[in-house]
Image (cartoon, rainbow, N blue to C red):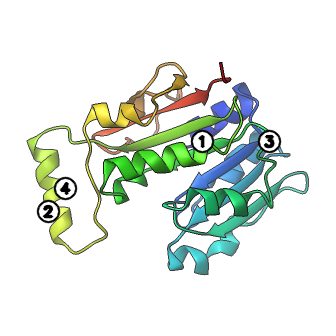
Amino acid sequence: MARAVRFLACEAGIRQFLDGGAGLPAADNTHQVAQRAAPECRVVYADNDPFVLAHARGLLTSTEEGACAYVHADMREPRTILTAAAGTLDLAQPTAVLLLGVLGHVSDYAEARSIVSGLLNGLPPGSYLALADSVSSGPAHREAGHQYAQTGAVPYQLRGPAEIHGFFAGLEPVEPGVVPIAGWRPDPSPVPSAPVGTLGGVARKLALA
């Protein structure tokens, strides 16, 4: 996440972020990384988890120059998310959508694709998608996924590499493209290993022909 956000703020010049599936506050949240790079960045988090709602204040500390907000909404309703996000973001300006480790919670692939397109269709050319998710990388990984499903936890769908690439259809990929996330513009210093079997990338929405 941090590498993608730094790229978006420092190199792509993005100043607005919509983080779908925010999760519980952590040490380095999206707004903290973005606002270190550019204090005027504006960030909206969206999540439907009641535990995240209870801790949302931890996501709402912002620089004076920027802004930070939380939307309690289901990512299956992209129009609702965009409408709420418009209270903080100017959606006529390029915006980065972050979907990191969340679309596996949507079992139907067509529905997951529609979530991505629904969010991006509400944003102008020059906006970006940063996405990463788990892939079915072999028998051991599939078995681990099966065992996880038997625990009664929230289901998580492992997808094939072609399906992950499909989320970026019609977008202009940022080098090095959709790759194992440990290899996406790695930091020069050692960092914790990325989850095994996770592909991700960043891509830009093109201008309409």
Q: Secondary structure at mark 2?
A: helix
- C-alpha span from label 3 to label 1: 12 Å
Instruction: Say which residue appears at 76% left-offset and 30% top-offset.
Output: 13
Instruction: Say which residue appears at 16% left-offset and 55% top-offset.
Output: 144
| Mark 3 surroundings within 10 Å by alpha-carbon count, few (fewer than 14), some (14 through 19), many (20 or more) | few
- C-alpha span from label 2 to label 3: 44 Å
Which amino acid is tagged 3? Answer: Ala
Residue 192 visible, this orientation: no
The spot of residue 58 in percent (x, y) is 67, 70
- C-alpha span from label 3 to label 4: 40 Å
- C-alpha span from label 1 to label 2: 34 Å
Which residue lies under the disc numbered 1?
A: 120
Query: Label 2 near label 4: C-beta < 8 Å?
Result: yes
Which residue lies under the disc numbered 4?
A: 145
Comparing labels 2 and 3, the label whose residue is closer to the camera: 3
Compared to residue 195, the image places residue 167 above or below, namely above
Please report whichever mark, 3 or 4, sits nearer to the chain's N-terminal start. Answer: 3
* Quadrant into which the N terminus falls: top right
Which residue lies under the disc numbered 3?
A: 92
Which residue lies under the disc numbered 2?
A: 147
Q: Secondary structure at mark 1?
A: helix
Which amino acid is tagged 2? Answer: Gln
Left or right? Give the position of 112 relative to 136: right
Q: Secondary structure at mark 4?
A: helix
Please report whichever mark, 1 or 4, sits nearer to the chain's N-terminal start. Answer: 1
Compared to residue 159, the image places residue 11 above or below, namely above
The spot of residue 79 in percent (x, y) is 62, 58
Farthest-out residue, right? 65
Q: Which of the 4 quarters of the picture holds residue 3?
A: top right
Please report whichever mark, 3 or 1, sits nearer to the chain's N-terminal start. Answer: 3
The spot of residue 163 in percent (x, y) is 31, 36
